[in-house]
Image (cartoon, rainbow, N blue to C red):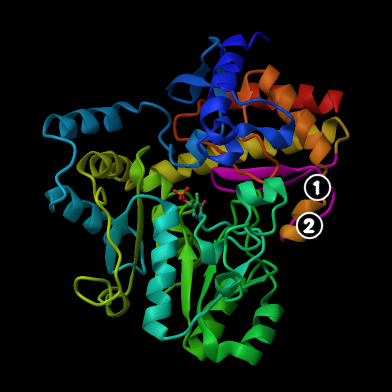
């Protein structure tokens, strides 16, 4: 397959941008590949600059639940942009966005818009520390919460991909306040709280992990976190940057019926624009400046064009039948891939929930970062390359989710399953 134009752009990019990319996982290093430069997207398809078409299962790493260039979203953006692109003053759209989030996400009574998921989690941590007057944070191995200093410890996603334990540049004095425990291991949480529970400001968790591939919470894990944090006066933060509006219109908290104290959002709420948000109980959120003293700000926060794209997306997602269809599509795809693997005698464990899932090359259950790492990276690499040759665009790392959008057609899903069958055959 001729990828000359991508290769040429990558060569130029590497001279100018660290690693040639503006976010590490895009570089496709862990699958021994070079990135494709993308020209355009439409529905569930993207085209690279060499003119090849792919069925896209990255969907901008989650945000594009309505696929590329959805007409409803495009119309909304066009309308917004006519009136100017930024004011640094309040707009009606921000109120509308806040109303939608508060209405849809069960535990959120008040919300602050920011520009990325990283900002959302970083700010939620600051708020939790201020509110409790404590410093320690508990997180889980393989969960990624953006790249702020406190949270880049045993993180998943790109950090997992490159096997970096944290990152140079993070002061030990900061990192020492973050305790990272095995996902799904409630006992280790009990042990830590037994020792230093009174020092813990918050437990932050991806209620469904999506940055070490998809790992589901075991029955009772999230409930257990809720109980323990309550008992010790620590806050429970759900990082729903992926799961918010993905697994249901009320996120994982609605699905599992657990109310966290704070919720971080991002990805889908921006409708393809750079957006994040954090919210929760009034009583906690009112500590944010200017109502309270916890400072957090943003020149472009609540940007009207981004708000409009997000609002347009959420309007579509308010219709719960969308989630039934996403569920159906996810089932077709992931069960289809599982079936093909069995037929071809390849051991896989497919973790899935609704429209997100992962294929791990192992015959063991995948329940935490340890078991994720047992999956055969070399097999994934070959699978990735075969799928790409068949015109299927997967995230270029075994530690990422496959995202199905509302506009993936049954035909595209069936084609993908056939392609997976061919790929399994040559593994
Ligand atoms: C993507 C992601 C983030 C970071 O969001 P950015 O917008 O990339 O900064 C945080 N938490 C989770 C769970 C994510 O998946």
Instruction: Using residue 328 as the reference point, say whether residue 156 is left or right of it.
Output: right
| Mark 2 nearby-residue class (10 Å; few <14, some 14–19, many ≥20) | some
Mark 2, ligand 1, within 8 Å: the answer is no
Instruction: Using residue 403 as the reference point, say whether residue 40 is left or right of it.
Output: left
Q: Are marks 1 and 2 in contact (CB under 8 Å)?
A: yes
Q: Position of residue 115 (x, y in %)?
A: 34, 50
Say if 85 sits above or below 44 in the image. Answer: below
Q: Position of residue 257 (x, y in %)?
A: 47, 69
Q: Which label was assigned to residue 237?
A: none
| Mark 1 nearby-residue class (10 Å; few <14, some 14–19, many ≥20) | many
Q: Which quadrant of the figure contains the C terminus?
A: top right
Secondary structure category for the residue under label 1: loop
- Residue at 82% x, 52% y: name it: 374
- Residue at 14% x, 45% y: name it: 87
Say if 196 sits above or below 143 in the image. Answer: below
- Residue at 28% x, 80% y: name it: 283
Residue 367 in the magenta stretch? The answer is: yes
Residue 264 at least partly seen:
yes
Residue 320 at least partly seen:
no
Q: Relative to the observer, which residue lies in front, 309 or 363?
A: 309
Q: Splitting the image into 4 quarters, where does residue 273 fall?
A: top left
Say if 380 sits above or below 171 in the image. Answer: above
Secondary structure category for the residue under label 2: helix
Name the residue carrying label 1: 375
Q: Splitting the image into 4 quarters, where does residue 107 fall?
A: bottom left
Name the residue carrying label 2: 371
Say if 66 sits above or below 204 in the image. Answer: above
Q: Relative to the observer, which residue lies in front, 227 or 173?
A: 173
In the image, the segment drawn in magenta is: 347-368
Instruction: Using residue 290 as the reference point, say whether residue 331 is left or right of it.
Output: right
Work out how far the residue at label 1 is from the one at label 2, CA to CA, in angstroms: 7 Å
- Residue at 27% x, 72% y: name it: 288
């Amino acid at each position: 397959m001729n990828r000359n134009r991508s290769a040429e752009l990558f060569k130029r990019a590497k001279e100018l941008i660290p690693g040639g990319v503006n976010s590490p996982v895009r570089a496709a290093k862990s699958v021994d590949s070079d990135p494709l430069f993308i020209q355009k997207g439409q529905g569930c398809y993207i085209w690279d600059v060499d003119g090849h078409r792919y069925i896209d299962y990255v969907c901008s790493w989650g945000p594009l639940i309505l696929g590329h260039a959805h007409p409803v979203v495009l119309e909304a953006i066009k309308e917004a942009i006519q009136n100017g692109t930024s004011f640094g003053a309040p707009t009606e759209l921000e109120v509308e966005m806040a109303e939608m989030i508060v209405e849809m996400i069960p535990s959120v009574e008040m919300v602050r818009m920011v520009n990325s998921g990283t900002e959302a989690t970083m700010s939620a941590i600051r708020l939790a520390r201020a509110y409790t007057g404590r410093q320690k944070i508990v997180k889980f191995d393989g969960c990624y919460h953006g790249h702020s200093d406190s949270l880049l410890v045993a993180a998943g996603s790109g950090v997992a991909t490159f096997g970096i334990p944290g990152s140079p540049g993070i002061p030990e004095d900061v990192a020492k306040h973050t305790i990272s425990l095995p996902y799904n291991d409630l006992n280790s949480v009990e042990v830590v709280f037994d020792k230093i529970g009174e020092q813990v400001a918050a437990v932050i968790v991806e209620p469904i992990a999506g940055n070490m591939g998809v790992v589901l919470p075991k029955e009772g894990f999230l409930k257990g976190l809720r109980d323990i944090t309550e008992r010790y006066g620590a806050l429970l933060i759900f990082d729903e940057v992926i799961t918010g509006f993905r697994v249901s219109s009320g996120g994982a908290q609605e699905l599992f019926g657990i109310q966290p104290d704070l919720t971080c959002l991002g990805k889908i709420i921006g409708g393809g624009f750079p957006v994040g948000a954090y919210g929760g109980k009034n009583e906690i959120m009112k500590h944010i400046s200017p109502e309270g003293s916890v400072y957090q700000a943003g020149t472009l926060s609540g940007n009207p064009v981004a708000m409009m794209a997000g609002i347009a997306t959420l309007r579509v997602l308010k219709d719960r039948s969308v989630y039934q269809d996403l569920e159906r599509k996810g089932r077709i795809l992931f069960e289809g891939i599982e079936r093909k693997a069995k037929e071809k005698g390849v051991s896989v464990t497919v973790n899935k929930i609704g429209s997100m899932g992962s294929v791990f090359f192992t015959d063991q259950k995948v329940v935490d970062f340890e078991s994720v790492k047992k999956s055969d990276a070399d097999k994934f690499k070959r699978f990735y390359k075969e799928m790409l040759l068949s015109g299927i665009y997967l995230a270029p790392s075994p530690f990422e989710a496959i995202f199905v959008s509302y506009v993936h057609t049954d035909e595209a899903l069936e084609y993908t399953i056939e392609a997976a069958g061919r790929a399994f055959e040559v593994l």
